[in-house]
Amino acid sequence: MLGVGASGPVGDGEAAASGPTVVRGLALPTLTERQAWALLVSIPGLGPVGFGALLRSLGSGRAILETALQRGAVGRLVAAGLNDERETFGRPVAEAIVAIAERPLPVLRAIELPGIEILTTEDAGYPRRLLEIEMPPHVIFVNGDVAAMSATHAIAIVGTRRPTEAGRRVAAQIGGAIAKTGATVVSGLAVGIDGSSHAAAAAEGGRTVAVLGSGHGRLYPKAHADLARKIVAGGGAIVSELVPDTHPSPSTFPRRNRLISGLADATIVVEAGERSGALITADWAMQQGRGCFMVPGPIDAPTSAGCLSWLRQYPGEVRIVAGIPELIEDLRLLEGAAPGPRKGMSLEAELIELGATARAVGMELVRGFGTLDELVVATDQPAATVLGALTMLELRGLAVSAYGRYRPAGRLASSGGRTATRKAILRSVRPSEPGPSAA
Amino acid sequence: MLATLLSATLVGLDGRVIRVEVDVAGGLPGFTIVGLADAALQEARERVRGAIRNAGFIHPPRRITVNLAPAEQRKAGASLDLAIALGILLGSEQVRASPERIALIGELSLGGEVRAVPGVLPMVAALARRGLRRVVVPADCIDEAGLVGGIEAVAVGTLRDAAELVRRRAGRRAVTIPPRVDLGGEPAPGGAAAGVPAVPATTVPLQLADLSEVRGQLEARRGLEIALAGGHGLLLVGPPGSGKTLLARTIPGLLPPLGDAEALAATIVASVAGDAPRALVRQAPVRAPHHTLSYAAMVGGGPRMSPGEVTLADHGVLFLDELPEFSRDVLEALRQPLEDGRVSVSRVGRATTFPARFQLVAAMNPCPCGMAGDPSGRCQCAPLLPERYTGRVSGPLRDRIDLWVTLPKVPPAALMTGVEPESSATVGARIATARTRQRRRSSGARLNGRISGRELRRICALNTIANRRAIELAEMEGLSGRGTERLLRVARTIADLAGESAVLGEHLEEAARFRSPMSRLAAREAS
């Protein structure tokens, strides 16, 4: 990391050990305790356990860095890191602490990015749900409104990155329904179910929190950069326990999953294969004593195999999602919650503006017709007209296309299932003009 | 004794007049050809020797020197055989003829038959430009030779016929020998041994299909109609079995016949390709090379500077199935022809420019396994891999593809029901009408796919409302200047199909459906 860290100028640490008590310590007094913590969590290999042990032995982050500048620092740090007589880290990590203590500023410059708030477990704004889990991250990096993480209700929605169309639809419906109650939707910003959940929550004007498996400076996946901006703009937050410069790697995602479940009162798995990472999140949710819900699916669908196997293995602990209103009831979301304010035009108003053809096409999309062939038959309009209408729906964010198929998006996807959307569409038909074909 | 005759060879698509000088002199018996002759031409010695002997003449046991002028020009192929053989017969005084200028084109078999050679049409045209009045050509090529005005073509079947023709002071009584009927005993004209580049083996012949055979896939049908009407580049993306190849097979039946100038150009290409066209080629070419083809097979080249696929598809369609499977440099090579409508092939000491005004139609799977987008989620590729797969279509090529169409897999039920599909005749008529409109309007009789950006903006004639819609769409897509231009191009063609003189909002809205899926990725994944 930035040429400092474990592979950095470790030799200087030895020089420090032979010198006077404090070497080049001028930079240290200017550091705040928050900065000291951020510096320390940037060291790979120094996890919550090791950092916790150091804090207990030495008192504060600044004290740890000051110790690192003293004679024989490496040995003292390793000793200070003892937890129940066992080493929590070895000499290489101690040497990395020494290196950072000697030259903190370059590392700090890469950590303190504009717009990224650094929260420690000492801060009042640190999400209380995370404090309740085992080994909460000492520092989290937040882009957006930190209050989004401390809403009265927060529900995590996770699932496969390769969902079926039905899976995306359900994720959007659940995300939209939860957002409408004013609860925060937590997920992992991945493609697939995560993306659909976040987007639906945002489309409903709700708050949503995305937990990254990388640092803020290495947002992954890149395809979701726009979505991330939307989340922040809608009063939500992007969170990571990793310093901004951290690349995503296979090990960072399972670790991130414990924060997804930790930030939520319950975790809903929409679609998960037998070995899906979403099940790791579900596992964390149960370990953390939070609720765990599974959306059932056909017994021969590989995308539902994980959900079904959990429903079978943990009856009573893992609950089934039997429908959107039922889920909202099971989650007790309507108790003590203030529904979030709706922004912008209502779905009805928007549909009125779009005109009859686009509305008819939108309706058929909600009914599940997805190809141009089907839409032409269903709306009885020429292909050219339907294509134009699809562009208009897309322009408003109400439809998207993928691989030659179209599906409802935004409010058209998230407004609580087919019936509700259909009602909205029907309400939007003015008596003076011809309505959609089915009206 | 010295005999001088005229003949011709090919350089690229052009015929070059060659003066063949044959000196039969005393000395040790020998046979030398000088004048930058390639291997096929050096082997003419053996063919000529056999042909002379088997035609009942004597190969003179003397020192034979053949000089091919102009000396500095490389000569290739077997088209000079007949002239060399007759030169020997004249030089050894076995045939006596007036010194009238004689031009002969043809390859000889060992038995003395005259075989067809590729490119007779441009070679005869070159001789005609030189002022020649008559030319002797192989019987199989008489039709294409006859297409050239101002010169009389005489067909011969054998060396003996040719000698007879010359002896009778050709000109007073023209003897036109009808093309020989091939009884099957002869090797087919233009066989591999004759060095005729015929049709490259890498080309998959397209079987014709009618649009009425294509059920469903309205979006792809519409995309194909627009692309063919405006000469736009088209990419079909769809899983195996979704009908991409079937659609491509309907293209020949949808293209209107070529105009006079285009037909002549196409006929010359067909002649050089060794197809021995019987009449002007009116059918626009559709080429479908296999993805294993080499760079030279695509752009042209080789020892004889033969035209490549881009030239064989001149004024027609180049269909590339499984686009990402083509090698990178082959695809990169499409850049210049797509931009300029021609391709330059340079070798040390030689450079040729071939015409390549083809329209690109390509097809590919949405991902390596082909199942991306299947509603059952059967795609086995890693998440986002399908997007990277589409990304393999390199930037410059992507810029030249005006329409992208993604085909869903049609469920079997849809094949039985749905709208009765239109036939190729109906759609083809619309395409022809739209093309006529464009040609009449454009300065260089060009289609919308090839007009300049400035001309495009003028002929779109956007009113205020349409202009606002264009800006709105460009913003939604995050379109670059080039992307906006593509949108306008396609919208212009849609308006032409609708018979509208100005591009309206509805045309722009439809055109926006056919843009690159790369820009859609973000929107899709965030829903």
Image (cartoon, coloured by chain):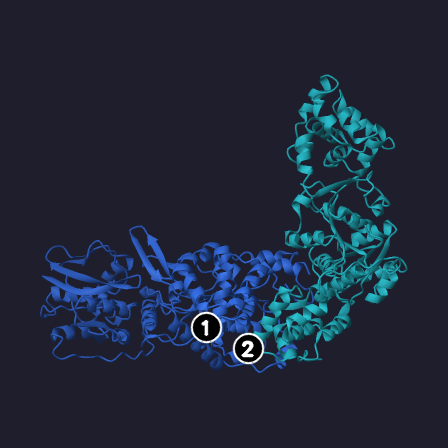
Chain colours: A cyan, B blue
Task: Please determine whether, in this image, residue B353 is positioned above or below residue B141.
Answer: above
Q: Are marks 1 and 2 on the same chain?
A: yes
Task: Please determine whether, in this image, residue B368 is positioned above or below residue A360.
Answer: above
Q: The C terminus of chain B lies in which quarter of the figure?
A: bottom right
Amino acid type, residue under disc 1 in the picture: Ala
Residue at the spot 77% in from the left edge and 49% down from the top edge: A257
Mark 1, Cα crowd under 10 Å, few <14 / some 14-19 / many 20+, is many
Image quadrant where residue A7 sits: top right
Q: Which chain letter matches label 2?
A: B
Q: Residue B476 appears at what percent x and percent y?
A: 59, 60
Q: Which chain letter matches label 1?
A: B
Q: Which mark is residue B229?
A: 1
Q: Which mark is residue B132?
A: none
Residue at the spot 69% in from the left edge and 32% down from the top edge: A6
Q: Which mark is residue B214?
A: 2
The answer to whether residue B305 of the structure is visible from this angle is: no
